[in-house]
Amino acid sequence: MANLALFLGGQARLRDAEILLAPILENHCDDSELSSADSEQRQYQRKVATIIQAMCLCEVKDMHQAQVVLAKEGGPENQVLIAMIQLLEGERYLAGETLEKAVLPMADLLIPVSEQLIRELNHG
């Protein structure tokens, strides 16, 4: 489902991608009926969905604006998202150079940056 959401985002069909991501992102505090393993899986899916949502917005909105937003902070997690944007633009070599400069962070570190990027692209 995540791959399909990313594909739809890449096709500038953000609304379709968000519909696919909605069940993952909604009810984020309501894991009471899940086993602990299911709850961990759901948390992981939410993290991935947030990153995908940010990438979909980058594809639909202005890629350059997204890179400017991310470059303000300059942390390694921002560099990873910048590399992802460069890949979406077909800049494979540049993305590789960007990733060489960054220490790859845990997915948890990408979430706040993705959320900030979503907010700024939606309201900026």
Image: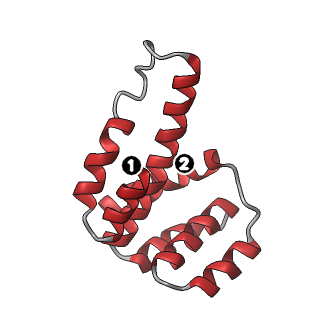
Position of 9 compared to 96: left or right?
left
| Marks 1 and 2 close (CB-CB < 8 Å) | no
Q: Earlier in the sequence, mark 1 or mark 2?
A: 1
- Please state which of residues 89 and 118 is positioned toward the viewer in this rendering: 89
Q: Which quadrant of the rendered structure holds the C terminus?
A: bottom left
Mark in front: 1 vs 2: 1
Q: Which residue is mark 1?
A: 1
**Residue 5 appears in the picture as rendered:** yes
At horizontal 72% and vertical 60% (from top left) the residue drawn is 104
Say which element carries label 2: helix
Please say if 72 is above or below 39.
below
At horizontal 68% and vertical 63% (from top left) the residue drawn is 75
Q: Alpha-carbon distance for marks 1 and 2? A: 19 Å
Say which element carries label 1: loop
Please say if 40 is above or below 76.
above
Where residue 106 sits in the image (x, y, percent)?
Answer: 69, 49
The amino acid pointed to by label 1 is: Met
The amino acid pointed to by label 2 is: Ile
Where residue 99 sits in the image (x, y, percent)?
Answer: 69, 72
**Residue 124 appears in the picture as rendered:** no
